[in-house]
């Protein structure tokens, strides 16, 4: 399919075009559609190119629009006028390919922006009755995700940018309920529409995955994300909205915050460094043992760990408390495998090398609590 995307350099347009190009180049393969050309049209595109685009398009995504004009007259010019020009150009070449238009939930409101969006919608429905073309009118609620311009028309983008960059935010009505859709869900819906699998609510098309949350709820989550480099925590990724908002927040980090330090507990045996602490999924750490060093020599009642040697050559030993049998596993970064530290078994890890460090990735089913460590010294041998 040859696909025309107007407003291609905007928030939704950029995300859509990137994925369409991924499909075209074979990088994204799990779609029941073939893309042979992505024709991108935006304000900086030569207007004459629109003729050729409309002549050969097999599908049109009309994402062009105005939401922050210098005067109210530009609403109608940008949201109605361009749509009219686009449809007239398709008519000129007798091209009755499907046409999608991005409207807004504000089309139901009586303000200049809503009126212009509503007029654009009606233009599409009239065009469909006249030409028989399939038209898809989407009334998007608030869309959030990467590449959305902050301090423009998205509260989420503004909050993400300001909080990530240590700037103040202003919340006028913390109890205001927001209806949101995530950009990747929008893109998935639009690509599904290429094959005729769009979702409807009456005569309007919709993104089936939406979220409802107060402004204060969004802000609280964002500030919790900001603390992660200090707490080593992770968001509740089982909650789809939290997962998507966290990805969005990260996309606004300044480059100097792409990296952050963690505390290395260093002694003459090597080092132990916590990487991630979670409420329900335990703790992730990395352990470095110097040549010839033995670490561990303890057991736990309930705590269990998984050891994964990623570099070096070592020996892991376990012995059930109250018995003499020692179970041994020779481990190496040349063969990545997981060794379970079983509750009720004292265990150790020995660096067998005389020259190289032994590097072990460790997962524990609970975060270390100095008040209740559940760790008891007892040499394996």
Image (cartoon, helix red, strand yellow):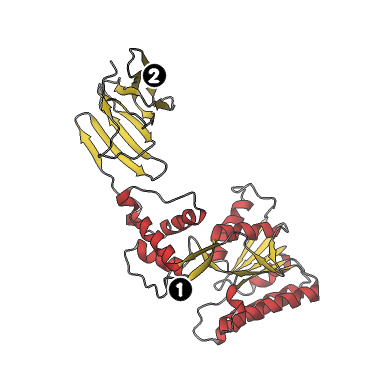
Decide if residue 337 is on the left or right side of residue 301.
right
Where residue 189 appears, x then y in whole percent?
A: 63, 59
Decide if residue 189 is on the left or right side of residue 127.
left
Q: Residue at x 37, y 17 (%)?
A: 328
Examine the rendering and report whether any part of residue 118 can be seen.
yes
Mark 2 highlights which residue? 329
Q: Residue at x 33, y 12 (%)?
A: 324
Label 2 secondary element: strand
Disc with the residue nearer the chain's start (2 vs 1)? 1
Examine the rendering and report whether any part of residue 85 can be seen.
no
Q: Residue at x 31, y 23 (%)?
A: 348
Mark 1 highlights which residue? 152
Quadrant location of the N terminus in the rendered image: bottom right
Q: Residue at x 54, y 86 (%)?
A: 72
- Compared with 367, 82 (above or below) is below
Q: Do the CB atoms of the residues marked 2 and 1 lie less than 8 Å apart?
A: no
Q: Residues within 10 Å of mark 2 (few under 14, many from 20)?
A: few
Where residue 220 appears, x then y in whole percent?
A: 39, 62
Label 1 secondary element: loop
């Amino acid at each position: 399919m040859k696909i025309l995307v107007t407003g291609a350099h905007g928030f939704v347009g950029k995300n859509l075009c990137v994925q369409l190009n991924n499909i075209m180049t074979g990088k994204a393969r799990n779609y029941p559609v073939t893309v042979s050309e992505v024709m991108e049209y935006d304000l900086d595109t030569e207007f004459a190119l629109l003729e050729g685009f409309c002549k050969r398009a097999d599908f049109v995504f009309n994402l062009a629009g105005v939401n922050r004009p210098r005067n109210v007259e530009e609403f109608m010019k940008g949201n109605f006028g361009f749509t009219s020009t686009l449809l007239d150009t398709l008519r000129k070449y007798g091209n009755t390919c499907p046409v999608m238009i991005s409207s807004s939930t504000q089309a139901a409101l009586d303000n200049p922006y809503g009126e212009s969006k509503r007029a654009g919608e009606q233009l599409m429905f009239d065009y469909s009755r006249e030409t028989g073309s399939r038209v898809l009118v989407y009334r998007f609620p608030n869309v959030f995700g990467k590449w959305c311009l902050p301090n423009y028309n998205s509260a989420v983008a503004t909050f993400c940018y300001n909080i990530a960059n240590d700037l103040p935010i202003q919340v006028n009505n913390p109890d205001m309920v927001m209806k949101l859709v995530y950009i990747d869900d929008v893109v998935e819906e639009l690509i599904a529409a290429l094959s005729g699998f769009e979702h409807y609510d009456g005569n309007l098309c919709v993104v089936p995955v939406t979220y409802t949350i107060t402004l204060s709820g969004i802000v609280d989550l964002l500030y919790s994300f900001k603390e992660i480099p200090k707490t080593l925590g992770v968001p509740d990724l089982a909650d789809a909205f939290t997962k998507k908002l966290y990805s969005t927040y990260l996309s606004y980090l300044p480059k100097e915050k792409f990296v952050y330090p963690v505390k290395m507990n260093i002694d003459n045996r090597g080092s132990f460094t916590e990487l991630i602490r979670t409420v329900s999924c335990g703790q992730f750490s990395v352990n470095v043992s110097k040549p010839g060093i033995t670490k561990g020599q303890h057991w736990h009642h309930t705590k269990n760990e998984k050891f994964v040697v990623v570099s070096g050559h070592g020996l892991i030993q376990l012995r059930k408390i109250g018995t003499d049998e020692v179970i041994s596993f020779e481990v190496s970064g040349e063969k990545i495998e997981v060794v379970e530290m079983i509750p009720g078994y004292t265990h150790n890890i020995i660096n067998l090398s005389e020259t190289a460090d032994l590097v072990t990735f460790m997962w524990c089913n609970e975060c270390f609590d100095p008040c209740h460590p559940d760790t008891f010294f007892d040499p394996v041998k």
